[in-house]
Amino acid sequence: MQSLEFSIMKPYTNLTCKVFTRFGGVSKKPFDSLNVGFGVGDKESDVKKNRELVLKSIGLKDIFYMKQVHKKDVFSINSKDDLRKRPVCDALITNLKNVGLAVQTADCQAILLYDTKKEVIAAIHSGFKSSIINIIGATILKMEKEFNTDPSDIIAGVSPSLGFCCAEFINYKKEIPEFFWKYKDSKNHFDFWSISKEQLINVGVKKENIEISNICTKCNSDTFFSYRKENITGRFVSIIGLF
């Protein structure tokens, strides 16, 4: 089972943070092979098996999945009772040990955060809609309010996702507010990596504490699922957890 790690996260031995590729699972084409997403057309039994394989490989007791809806609701996991819930949201926060926070993507960004002082983690699903309404800012604000996080103590990793090279929005005038047009090139491609970086910095995360994978999922659909490339496809998973 293949996964990527952020170099910025590696020094912290109490932390696991991995982005899994599409390899190492049991799903058949076009969901081959490590699809963790229900509701995309894959066999439910195969998705369950893939999730079990991911859990076994990462060494945690549980992995918490949310129902992602491209908005900016943030859910805090504060107790074992919360682990029985499956919230409709696009970001998760916790300071509980042995709980992996999961983000499922196939072009969207998974943004993984770690407060190195308070030992709080967050996992954000940021598609272009959530990016526009600044789910990053909403998540860090909740970390500040509920866990007394200082944003300058946060380190951040941004997963493989749709790159500037391929993020074309033909109807951008209807879909994307004018404020974001400064991130557009002459071919109507938008740089959402830069948008996320700026949003992180604007809420107090240090520039040197941000690591962007710079891997485009559409250009690398042989390694990562890409909805833009394949349309009918699976979802790969990015996970952060505390030991």
Image: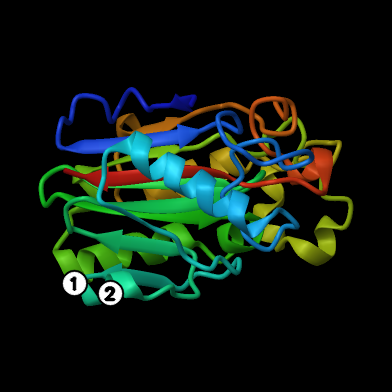
Q: Residue at x 17, y 31 (%)?
A: 12
Above or below for 211 versus 56: above
Q: Nearer the viewer, residue 160 or 98?
A: 98
The circle drawn on residue 79 is 1
Q: Secondary structure at mark 2?
A: helix
- Across and down, in percent, residue 38 comes to 62, 60
Q: Residue at x 70, y 63 (%)?
A: 177
- Across and down, in percent, residue 204 comes to 29, 50
Q: Which residue is mark 2?
A: 82
The reply to whether dot 1 and dot 2 touch (C-beta < 8 Å) is: yes
The circle drawn on residue 66 is none
Assess disc 2: are there few (<14), some (14-19) or many (≥20) residues with their C-alpha within 10 Å of its C-alpha.
Answer: few
Q: Nearer the viewer, residue 131 or 101?
A: 101
Taking the image as shown, residue 65 lies to the left or right of residue 94, namely right
Quadrant for the C terminus, please: top left
Q: Amino acid at mark 1?
A: Ser
